[in-house]
Amino acid sequence: MTTLSKPQKVGVALAALLSLAGLPSVLTPTPEGETGPPYVVLALGSVLGLIGLVAAVLAWRGHRGALRVLAGATIISALTGVPAFFVDVPALLKLLVAVSVLVSVAAVVLMFTPSRHPAREPATN
């Protein structure tokens, strides 16, 4: 277990908020006749949101491996929104997806920002 630096905590918090926002996506399917994500993508968003939240809690408590799981869930979730740029959807939706992708990138970068304080080497006799 390790202690997170301040930038890492900000990254974990941003990723946790994105994961929380993705949880209810399965409950809002695209209405018939409208352009939107398929139900499978919405279900994947909810599953990734749950995985992300669990990983965020574990990462906050210092589990290094959970950072990687959280980053993976955040990246995959961001990638599921990219097709919105290539289909005919309202500009507001494209803007929301763009902001989500940028926040996802920022969160992952912050999660893996090295600490400014070098690790202390154990004393040798």
Image: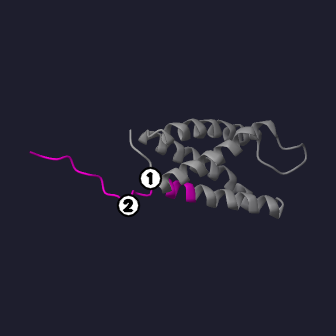
In the image, residue 51 lies in the stretch drawn in magenta: no
Image height of 14 relative to 86, above or below? above
64 or 88, nearer to the observer? 64
In the picture as drawn, the residue positioned furthest to the left comes out as 125
Judging by the rendered image, the residue that carries numbered circle 1 is: 5
Rendering coords of residue 27 (x, y %): 79, 36
- What range of the chain is rendered magenta? 106-125
Image height of 50 relative to 12, above or below? above
Locate the C terminus and report the quarter of the image it occupies: top left
The residue drawn where x is 84% and y is 51% is 35
Image height of 73 relative to 113, above or below? above
The residue drawn where x is 82% and y is 40% is 29
The residue drawn where x is 65% and y is 47% is 17
Rendering coords of residue 98 (x, y %): 69, 61
In the image, residue 122 lies in the stretch drawn in magenta: yes
Q: Quadrant of residue 24?
A: top right
87 or 43, nearer to the observer? 43
**Which of the marked residues, 1 or 2, is nearer the chain's N terminus?**
1
| Amino acid at dot 2 | Arg
Is residue 86 at all visible to an observer of this figure? no
- Residue 71's tag is none
Locate the N terminus and report the quarter of the image it occupies: top left
Rendering coords of residue 51 (x, y %): 59, 36
Judging by the rendered image, the residue that carries numbered circle 2 is: 116
Q: Please rate how many residues cluster around mark 1, counting C-alpha atoms within 10 Å: few if below 14, some from 14 to 19, many from 20.
A: some
Asked whether the residues under the numbered discs 1 and 2 touch, taking CB atoms below 8 Å apart as contact, a structural biologist would say yes
Rendering coords of residue 92 (x, y %): 81, 62
